[in-house]
Image (tube, rainbow, N blue to C red):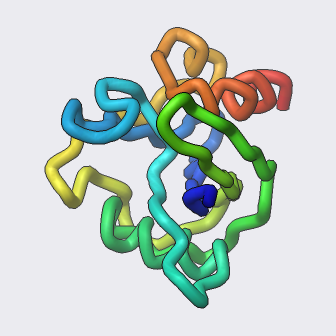
Amino acid sequence: MAIRVAAGIITREDQVFIALRSDDKHQGGCWEFPGGKVEEGEDPAEALARELMEECGITTDKSELFKFIRHDYIDKSVELYFYLVSEFSGEPHGKEGQKVTWVNRSDLSTYTFPEANVPIVEALLKV
């Protein structure tokens, strides 16, 4: 059974907010769009709002589904709901101690992302 994940592509002007996965997590050491698992009975958009508050300390004011991706890694399958977060309250930060940064959209390809995120990076470079 696939793990359902909601991830936020948090944008401000031509910048995107990304976080570094800790080494002890699946795909550790890669950069990611913040988010997390969708809980039982939870809508992906609700999960996104909850996760972004927990991980980044922001309230999501406006988000829209950007892309859905199903990806099979050797050890697990994931269903990823990527949302463009264009309006939010608060200043995103690494609330759980994770390293975070704002990057220019055009520089996203210079960061290492999990394999399932690569189509998202490619799509964002075309926007």
**Residue sitting farthest toward the left:** 97
Picture coordinates of residue 25, whole percent (x, y): 28, 41
Q: Quadrant of the C terminus?
A: top right
Residue at the extreme right: 126
**Image check: 71 left or right of 92?**
right
Looking at the rendering, which quadrant does residue 96 occupy? bottom left
Please tell me which residue is depicted at 62% across the width and 66% down the height of the picture.
87
Location of residue 38 by image quarter: bottom right
Residue 103 at x, y percent in the picture: 48, 28
At horizontal 62% and vertical 60% (from top left) the residue drawn is 1
Instruction: Please name the residue shown 56% across and 58% down the image.
Output: 3
Q: Position of residue 12 (x, y in %)?
A: 58, 47
Q: Nearer the viewer, residue 87 or 65?
A: 65
* Whether residue 100 can be seen here: no
Q: Is residue 105 visible?
A: yes
Identified at 68% across, 39% down, the residue is 71
Q: Is residue 54 left or right of residue 58?
A: left
28 on left or right of 18: left
Depth check, front residue: 87 or 31: 31
Name the residue nearer the viewer: 74 or 42.
74
What x and y, as percent, mark residue 66?
Answer: 79, 52
Q: Is residue 53 above or below residue 100?
A: below
Q: Is residue 42 above or below residue 109?
A: below
In the displayed structure, 34 sits above or below 119; it is below
